[in-house]
Amino acid sequence: MISSIIAAALVQTRPPADMQPVATPFFFYLLSGLMIVGGLMVITRKNPVHSALALIVTLLGQAGLYLMLYAPFVAGVQIILYVGGIMVLFLFVIMLVNLERTQQEKSFNKQWAVGLAAAAALGAMFVSVYVKGRALFPELPVAPLEGENTQRIGSMLYGNYMFAFEIASLLLLVAIIGAVVMAKKRI
Amino acid sequence: MNDPNARVSVESIPEEKPFLDASELVINMGPQHPATHGVLRVILKLDGEKVLGLECVIGYLHRGVEKIAENRTYTMFNPYVDRMDYVAAVSNGLGYCEAVEKLLNTEAPPRAKYIRVILTELNRLASHQLWLGTHALDIGAMTPLFYTFRDREEILKIFEKYCGARLTTHAFRIGGCQYETYDGFEQDVRNFLNFFTPKIDEYEELLTANRIWVRRTKNVGVISGKDCIALGVTGPVLRASGVKWDLRKAQPYAAYKEFDFDIPVGENGDTYDRYLVRMAEMRQSMRIIRQAVDGLPDGPVMAKIPKVLKPPVGEIYHSIEAPKGELGYFIVSDGSTQPYRIRVRPPSFVNLQALEVMCRGALVADVIAVIGTLDIVLGEVDR
Amino acid sequence: MLNYITSYLDKSVQMTPGQAGNLFWALVYILLVFGGVSLAVVCMNWLERKILAHMQIRLGPMRVGPHGLLQPIADAIKLILKEDIIPANADVAVFWLAPLIILLAVFSVYCVVPFGPTHAITDMNIGILFMLGVSSLGVLGIVMAGWASNSHYPLIGALRSSAQMVSYEVAMGLAVVSAVLMTSLNATGTGTLSMIGIVQAQYAQHVWFVFKFFPLGFIAFGVFAIAMVAETNRAPFDLPEAESELTAGFHTEYSGLRWSLFMLGEYGAMIAVSSIAITLWLGGWMRPFPNLLHGAAFDLAFSLFPALTFFGLAGLTFYSTSRMPKHPYFRLQTLGLGVFGALFAVIGLILLIPPVFQRVQDIYWFIAKIAVFMYLFIWYRGTFPRYRFDQLMKVGWKVLLPIGLGVLVLTAIVGVMV
Amino acid sequence: MAEDPKPPDAPKPAPDAEAKAAAPPAKPATPAKPAGPVPVAWDSPLTARLKEQFGSGVEPLTYLEQNYLQVDRASVSPILQILRDQDQFDYCVDITAVHYPNRERPFDVLWILYSFPHNQRLRVKAQFADGESVPTAVNLWTTANWLEREVFDMFGIRFEGHPDLKRILLPDGWKGHPLRKDYGILQQDQEWVQINLGIESGQ
């Protein structure tokens, strides 16, 4: 939320050549911190509505990071789809079901040790990839995309990745039909 | 509430199971709620927006009118009846006075009868106006309320000039009318009729062809004529379901025999038909008033009745067509100055019982529309 | 520092402060826009009550100040002083956050509203997308408010509004896309999502998009105009706060200042969606007939409009002043109304100063168009009954959505063929 | 509640009336004044048929041109059934009761019926003792549901077979049945005020 405001007011989507984006490292850590805190809250809150709200914070932080990567279109879509659409539906469903039982249940069951181990392993993998792979991914300054980022995405989606795009939309169609069939008692 | 015995003669609609086992929502609508027209409390059992069942809880305005009557003389009780259906106080008074007159085996003089008809029909107009305004407001149309109140004011002015009161008029006395009409009464009534004729068209312009209005009212709260009779529902609700029955025609009282008017009837028994029937009824009322004013006979307005009323021992049931339906008075006399028992048969109370049938399977918004279309007055429901 | 400030005023900088990266002016614009919107909401409050009252043969507020002009201020003071009630079983944090989120979402939208070619806080490459995205966050606040109140009426209100807003966003999006599509049908063949770019495209194509490919643009505009009423929860789509059904819907449990924040959000959202409609279809800040009636004479005539409007308002106020009752009791009120009129006249005079009226013109036309929309909003409220929930969904999914899709496809086809 | 001039418990001083109402057949009125009209026997095909079937259990009378049947309590249920099914009294206008405390069977229960096809009204009247149950009419006319609940609420008369017999106008915790003649209104009021408001009498 806050990030999007800051992004709107301060982060240039089309930075002039002579200016650097404002306080990039600061915003990077701010947004990442928000995302991490949000992510932790998602799994630790007992109340599912609180979890969902924390997830929204995480997603907004992600949108902010996209903005910092000069990908405003992706950021906008992230907000519209995830926050405005999917999360609202999440909340909708959560509010419909009875919450009283979830309040009493333990949020972590006995497998928490296993889960922690898995998380640790995954973290170790990330670190190792980061350490070993530095050579593979040289640290280049992010080059602001010239001109219209949106148009590039459009031409890529409908050009190079046309087939994948159509497959994805077909999948979604199948999902919609499936949902209708499951939900409706008689068609 | 859900006992199947409770509604044998009503075609039963199978109750649907809540979808996906989402928890049922029980909400209390009222007694403080903008759309329950007073202190009606409706307990709604909802599946999302759908009404699975409802129960009316009434009695918040119970004042024990019937008990009060047993401790008052016949004359003293007369003002109390105005407080039941306070929207149509004149009709209440008419019913009570006629019932006692019948018990006394007397009759009001013809002029009094005509005045009674004029005032009662004016009151019917006022009652229907109030219904229209609040009903439209419930459905979300805000403006008609102010239009109807503007025009209702003219009727109340006539009442005020006639008897000094606007709402709880106490216009009639046992045996006739207390007052002769004031100078210019007839002219006032005629002026009002001329003033009001285009106003009904104005209301209809706002609502009748309004697409949203039609959608909100067509096929909402449908009740068949058979169900209406089984549930004892009377008045415009019954007529909108296609039963052509009006006590003014079926068992004429006061001077109604002498007037020419039609009984508007609906077809589908839905909220829209009830709306049309009431609108048509307003036009018929104006017809009656015009005839009554034109033919207002001369003569006394009060029959010769004793100062102290002591009706002979016996019991009587008399009912009239109030704006809401059949308003009946059952009076038992023990020969003393006070009634031994008065029972009021309130149309609103009986009509309200149909709410459950009319709302089955409907949505929350329909419940509001149906409460509005039943045109209940809680003062009368609870007495 | 001073250099930094004045550098933006240089004639050669034809950019919004956001684009120019001038933080100082961006801040000034933010304050101006937010202050202006808040002021507009206050005015709307008074106007809605007055206009609605006159539609309903009443007078509306008449007591506080002449013709009730100070009523919104009195209301604001009352709301601030009122006890702020938080229900005992409410989820306090969420309850507290909900109105703020609505407000944040609504006000963020104004970041990209172009009041003129340079009169916007910033211009984004993804302007319209940003607007839709951020305004869709408002529903989050409503859902949170309804849930956190821990009461049934607000919960039903929240369920209604989330379903309603999500479904109408689809139709709205389709209508917007068809407008965006029209921007790409210019000589260069490149479209834009930028708000300023969209208006400039209309200027370049010599047509307001509402008239483009008649009747396609008009239908798309119609779809948007209906969907935007639903988006802002206004009559006849005001189900989430249907007072006769759900008492006050999602904000039933709110009171005092927090409640007023919801109102601020609602009216702010109305202005925001109106400005989207204006930008996309009604030529944004452009004056009527910029291409048809051009030339020095017309330019001058149209540029006099702002001043004339204020003179007209002043005249109206003076007329009302003359009709005030002459009783000494009303002396102060009469005086106040006179001062009000004088204020209008002075503003009108200021607007006649050439550098001012050159700069103000765009803003004037934009606001005038918004005013028309606001009047429509009020008019709807005075005229229409309320839809039922299933009917509302039917309108959204079975009427607006297919129409929106059809218009989109047809616009694409026509655009390729032309 | 207004002041009651009489002691609340005392029934109305009308012993004659009660005696007469208890035995309504056309006994000449008491020596007292207005010798009003008296109920007279009512003859019609309907009554003939009923008489034939129920004998002395039913007594058709008419008073001031209004017909009613004085019915033995045992035959209430079949008579109502017959009236609805054979004589087309399809509309139950009202169900109510009257309390005569000094009588052996103190309650008169009345069914006011109306026939749409014949445009005719009819009252059915039966006497019941305190604590005796009255057969319900809900299975005949749906409208009887609330009407019977009100009679129960006000008189404490139980209707057998009623699906949901509970108080309707008064709160669930109310004591007594107010329309009985021996119900003390002042006493009730004082008690309520003391319990709920914690102060001495309201009257």
Image (cartoon, coloured by chain):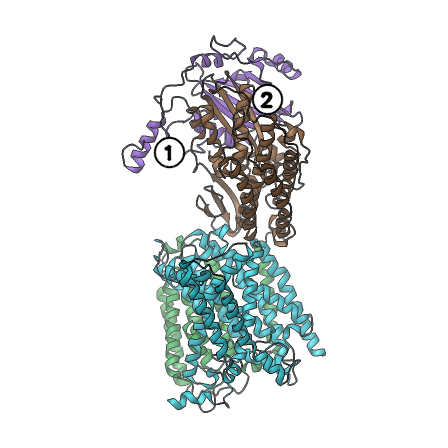
Question: Is C263 in front, or is A178?
Answer: C263
Reading the chain from its start, which is encountered first: label 2 or label 1?
2
The residue that mark 2 highlights is D122
Which amino acid type corresponds to the residue marked 1 in the rendered image?
Gly
Establish if A8 lies above or below B45. Answer: below
Of the chain colours in the picture, the one used for chain D is purple
Task: Report crowding for label 2: few under 14, some 14 to 19, many 20 or more residues within 10 A (C-alpha).
Answer: many
The residue that mark 1 highlights is D173
Residue D201 located left or right of residue B201? left
Of the chain colours in the picture, the one used for chain C is cyan
Q: Which chain is brown?
A: B
Establish if D50 lies above or below C141. Answer: above
Residue B224 located left or right of residue C362? right
For the C terminus of chain C, the image quarter is: bottom right
Q: Are marks 2 and 1 on the same chain?
A: yes
Which amino acid type corresponds to the residue marked 2 in the rendered image?
Leu
Give how far across and how far down residue B26 sits, in percent. 46, 46
Of the chain colours in the picture, the one used for chain A is green
